[in-house]
Image (tube, rainbow, N blue to C red):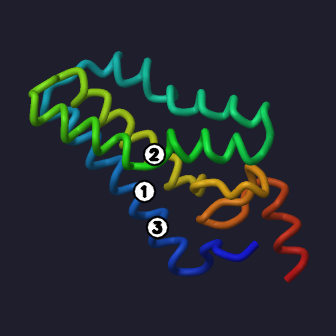
Amino acid sequence: MSGETTGAVRVLLRLEGFCMLVAACIVYAKLDLDWSTFALYFLVPDISLLGYFAGAKVGAVSYNTAHSYLGAFASLVIGFTVPSLTLQCAGLIWCAHIGFDRALGYGLKYPAGFGFTHLGRIGRFAAKHSEEQ
């Protein structure tokens, strides 16, 4: 699959994800937000995986919509502009989730299937890819 990232660039992108996770958690703590809320909503973006029941293309769109920083940043910008503590909280949890996923290697998906990401192949697709090389 063309477009996947490998080598040092992949490591750098995963480290950026980890940094986003840490930064979101630090800001969350500085705002003195409730950690039980964080725990309760941390995995909410993964509901987007249900899109894969409609096929790989729909699943990729669904997953990428929930795992792009665009929505999370919009939530933060609006949350700090209005101001709305609820949107700030949601945006920080959302950023932390995306950062966590990226740090683990779960990148944005290609329509070829869940295992084909911008950070490289994952799962059984990674094993097949390494055998091919």
The correct choice, above or below, for 121 with respect to 10 in the image is: above
Q: Which mark is residue 93?
A: none
Which residue is found at the position 68% from the left and 58% from the top?
110
- Label 2 near label 1: C-beta < 8 Å? yes
Which callout, 3 or 2, points at the residue further toward the start of the chain?
A: 3
Residue 116, image x and y in percent? 72, 59
Residue 121, image x and y in percent? 72, 63
**Toward which corner of the image does residue 86 lie, by quadrant?**
top left
The correct choice, above or below, for 91 with respect to 10 in the image is: above
Look at label 1 and name its amino acid.
Gly
Q: Which mark is residue 13?
A: 3
Q: How many marks?
A: 3
Q: Is residue 121 left or right of residue 10?
A: right
- Label 3 near label 1: C-beta < 8 Å? yes
**Toward which corner of the image does residue 88 lie, by quadrant?**
top left
Residue at the spot of label 1: 17
Which quadrant, please, contains the N terminus?
A: bottom right
Residue 56, image x and y in percent? 77, 46
Look at label 3 and name its amino acid.
Leu
Q: Which mark is residue 98?
A: 2
